[in-house]
Image (cartoon, rainbow, N blue to C red):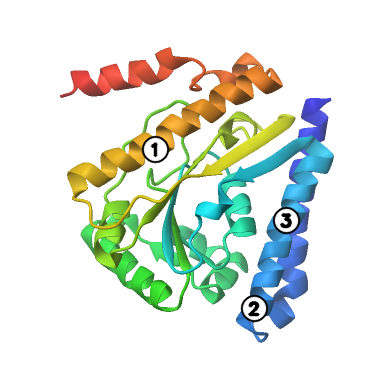
Amino acid sequence: MTLLRSLAFNCLFYLNLTVQLLLFAPVFFVVSEEQDWRIVKNWARSSLWLLRRVAGTRSEVTGVENLPRSSAIIAAKHQSYWDVLALVAVVERPTFILKKELMRVPVFGAYARRMKMIPVDRAKRGGAIASMVAGAEAAIADGRQIIIFPEGTRTLPGVEQDYRQGVFRLYEALDLPVVPVALNSGLYWLRTSPRRLPGTIHADILEPIPSGLPRQEFLPALRTAIETRSGELAAEAVARDGLPPLASAGSAGLPEAAGATRDRRSARG
């Protein structure tokens, strides 16, 4: 039954995305920014509604009071596409740092450009950082909130990934606090399977890290905040929703997986 409900959700999720992209295209590029955000947030919320009604997967976001009302940098754990939906739904005017390849996707890329997302060409390395910072400075000047996934890609629950330098470069250049976001979405929205498991995905928006810290203090503080709370959320999910081994393998509920990653990294020096 879970598999059938998951397949039904996946079909409806992409159908909802396609229909809304095409349905609103004639007006999206001519109406005001405020109306554009209503359209985008309606898509995110309708997708989360489908996830709950069809797959039986509820969504919970706590700590919203930690989001600044003005410009901010939000650094979130990234385990699934749910992360994007949830953040779009609760952040007022989010500007995502995303892969340049996404801007080439038909229709979606046009929407992303209209909403002033910031593409990063990772092949350019140092040049990509300069371009990202310039885009972020423009977004902050416009009163928006920057969302970055510091790991640079989706990771499986419990797998430790190095945090890329981009998040510190933004923190340093913009001189703003960084709001960490922990979550456990990868336990329910599986990366390597079409299954969407019933239960409650939980994201927790944590207290901001103040501006002005040196790199050697900032990155460990950010990593510790996100990884510790994400581990707690994963353990709570496994205990509460009785997730099967396929979903909980490698999660913080099985510390040997994360420990093995640390041991391998230590062995490499």
Q: Residues within 10 Å of mark 3 (few under 14, many from 20)?
A: some
| Amino acid at pointer 2 | Glu
| x and y, in percent, of residue 117 in the image | 48, 67
Where in the figure is residue 84, as x and y percent of width and height? 57, 52
Residue found at x 59% / y 36%: 185
Depicted 115 relative to depicted 229: above or below: below
Using the image, tell me which numbered label, if any, was put on residue 140.
none
Can you identify the residue that label 3 sits on? Answer: 45
Q: Which residue extends farthest left?
A: 269
Q: Where is residue 176 in the image (x, y as percent from the top left)?
A: 33, 62
Q: Which is more N-terminal, label 3 or label 2?
A: 2
Quadrant of image for the N terminus: top right
Say which label, 3 or 1, has the lower sequence index. 3
Regarding residue 196, the answer to whether it shows in the image is no
Taking depth in this image into account, of 113 and 44 the one nearest to the observer is 44
Q: How far apart are marks 1 and 2 (CA)?
A: 33 Å
In whole angstroms, how far apart are the C-alphas of marks 2 and 3? Answer: 16 Å
Which tag is nearer the camera, tag 3 or tag 1?
A: 1
Type of residue at label 1?
A: Ala
Expressed as whole percent of the image width and height from the top left, the position of residue 105 reads 56, 63
Residue nearest the viewer, comparing 169 with 176: 176
**Any part of residue 79 in sight:** yes
Judge the density around disc 2: few (<14), some (14-19), many (≥20) Cα neighbours within 10 Å. few
Q: How far apart are marks 3 and 1 (CA)?
A: 27 Å
Q: Which of marks 1 and 2 is nearer the N terminus?
A: 2
Could you say which disc has been placed on residue 34 in the image? 2
Q: Dot 1 surroundings within 10 Å: few (below 14), some, or many (20 or more)?
A: some
Residue at which label 1 appears: 225
* Disc 3, SS: helix
In the image, taking residue 71 as reference, residue 197 lies left or right, namely right
Q: Residue at x 38, y 47 (%)?
A: 150
Q: Which of marks 1 and 2 is in front?
A: 1
